[in-house]
């Protein structure tokens, strides 16, 4: 949501009133999932999206009415063959969108720890009231002690899974929006594939760090999208910044003196994903070396190697797509199989 918040900041600094539209419920197939957001300024400018373009114009119209009335509302859209060319979801799904004047409490970008914002979207009173919840603290109230307690419990559960969604407590419907720390991607080896992967991963929401001790390769000019550039040996960097559960590691150097020390630190760590480039023959020799170096077999078994999904990638850019796809599958706890063969009802949520 960082680009959206940048736009909102510019609008509000210029004195423009803003409404925020949030998808709070999805049924069936829809282009965007719960938590998708769109901002609308008082002069009709739009930033972000709540669908694939199907209902944005209608939501913008509703948002202007919300700004005029100073009252939040829920609007619903579904497939309607009679009006499909006017407004509706051509994918056949249905969505509920909560539209409110710009709230004072929204999930922040890249928080240091998971945070949830609970909003009353239906109920006998207090529509739009918010409460901010972390593992350690609660700020604000939804106006009812029992509803607050239920919302806090639901928020903390959802912070663990990272999934926003609706919760019900008595007569109240509460939308729990979740913001997680930005996933960290450590790219070891400032090679050609890393250039493409860095750019793609940054756009997909990863905070990318490039690690390579060779100053001629590890430069800002080659990696303009990297958050951090470390012209250092990778095992030193991993010792100083140990991987956590939100860390992804892609070893691309294809050089034992880079690869093995990195994997010896990364594989026993809580890192969500650890992959290394190389053929199956290279991977077999690498696994033998890691076990000989004292790494437990169960840790070696975590290695994604050969790295990436089997999409027939050949060029550096295609290989980067393959690697990024496997990391996204790991982040979403999906198998990475073809969507055609997937049994999941909501394939893009």
Image: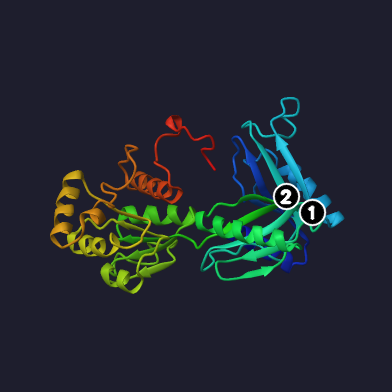
> Label 1 vs label 2: CA separation?
7 Å
Q: Residues within 10 Å of mark 2 (few under 14, many from 20)?
A: many
Q: Nearer the viewer, residue 127 or 204?
A: 127
Is 337 left, or right, of 251 in this rendering?
A: right
At horizontal 60% and vertical 38% (from top left) the residue drawn is: 30
Q: Secondary structure at mark 2?
A: strand
The type of colouring in the image is rainbow
Which quadrant would the N terminus be assigned to in this image?
Answer: bottom right
List the residue tagged with mark 2.
98
Please tell me whether residue 233 is drawn above or below residue 189 in the rendered image.
below
Is 282 left, or right, of 125 in this rendering?
A: left
Q: Nearer the viewer, residue 164 or 55?
A: 164
Q: Residue 169: image x %, image y %?
A: 70, 52
Q: Are marks 1 and 2 in contact (CB under 8 Å)?
A: yes
Q: Secondary structure at mark 1?
A: loop
Residue 240 tag number? none
Residue 316 in view: yes
At horizontal 50% and vertical 63% (from top left) the residue drawn is: 181
Total marks shown come to 2
Residue 213 in view: no
List the residue tagged with mark 1.
72
Q: Earlier in the sequence, mark 1 or mark 2?
A: 1
Which quadrant would the C terminus be assigned to in this image?
Answer: top right
Q: Quadrant of residue 226?
A: bottom left
Q: Residue 45: image x %, image y %?
A: 73, 53
At horizontal 22% and vertical 65% (from top left) the residue drawn is: 261
Please tell me whether residue 300 is drawn above or below residue 132 in the rendered image.
above
Q: Nearer the viewer, residue 121 or 284?
A: 121
Q: Residues within 10 Å of mark 1 (few under 14, many from 20)?
A: many
């Amino acid at each position: 949501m960082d680009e959206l918040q940048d736009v909102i900041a510019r609008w509000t600094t210029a004195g423009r009133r803003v409404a925020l539209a949030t998808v709070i419920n999805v049924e069936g197939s829809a282009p965007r999932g719960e938590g998708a957001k769109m901002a609308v300024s008082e002069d009709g400018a739009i930033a972000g999206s709540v669908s694939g373009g199907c209902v944005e114009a209608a939501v913008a119209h509703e948002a202007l009415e919300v700004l005029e009335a100073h009252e939040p509302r829920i609007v619903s859209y579904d497939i309607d063959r009679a009006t499909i060319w006017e407004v509706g979801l051509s994918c056949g799904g249905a969505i509920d969108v909560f539209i409110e004047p710009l709230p004072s409490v929204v999930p922040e970008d890249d928080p240091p720890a998971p945070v949830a914002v609970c909003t009353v979207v239906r109920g006998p009173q207090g529509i739009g009231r918010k409460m901010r919840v972390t593992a350690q603290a609660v700020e604000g109230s939804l106006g009812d002690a029992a509803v607050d307690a239920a919302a806090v419990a639901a928020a903390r559960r959802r912070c663990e899974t990272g999934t926003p969604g609706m919760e019900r407590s008595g007569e109240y419907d509460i939308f729990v929006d979740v913001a997680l720390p930005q996933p960290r991607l450590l790219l070891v080896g400032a090679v050609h594939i890393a250039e493409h992967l860095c750019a793609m991963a940054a756009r997909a929401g990863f905070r990318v760090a490039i690690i390579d001790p060779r100053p001629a390769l590890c430069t800002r000019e080659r990696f303009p999208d990297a958050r951090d550039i470390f012209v250092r040996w990778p095992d030193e960097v991993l010792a100083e910044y140990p991987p956590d559960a939100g860390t992804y590691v892609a070893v691309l150097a294809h050089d034992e003196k880079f690869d093995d020390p990195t994997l010896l630190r990364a594989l026993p760590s809580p890192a969500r994903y650890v992959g290394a480039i190389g053929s199956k023959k290279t991977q077999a020799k690498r696994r033998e070396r890691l076990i000989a170096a004292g790494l437990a077999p169960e840790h070696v078994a975590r290695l994604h190697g050969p790295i990436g999904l089997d999409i027939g990638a050949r060029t550096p850019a295609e290989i980067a797509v393959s690697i990024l796809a496997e990391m996204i599958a790991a982040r979403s706890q999906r198998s990475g199989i073809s969507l055609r063969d997937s049994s999941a009802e909501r394939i893009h949520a």
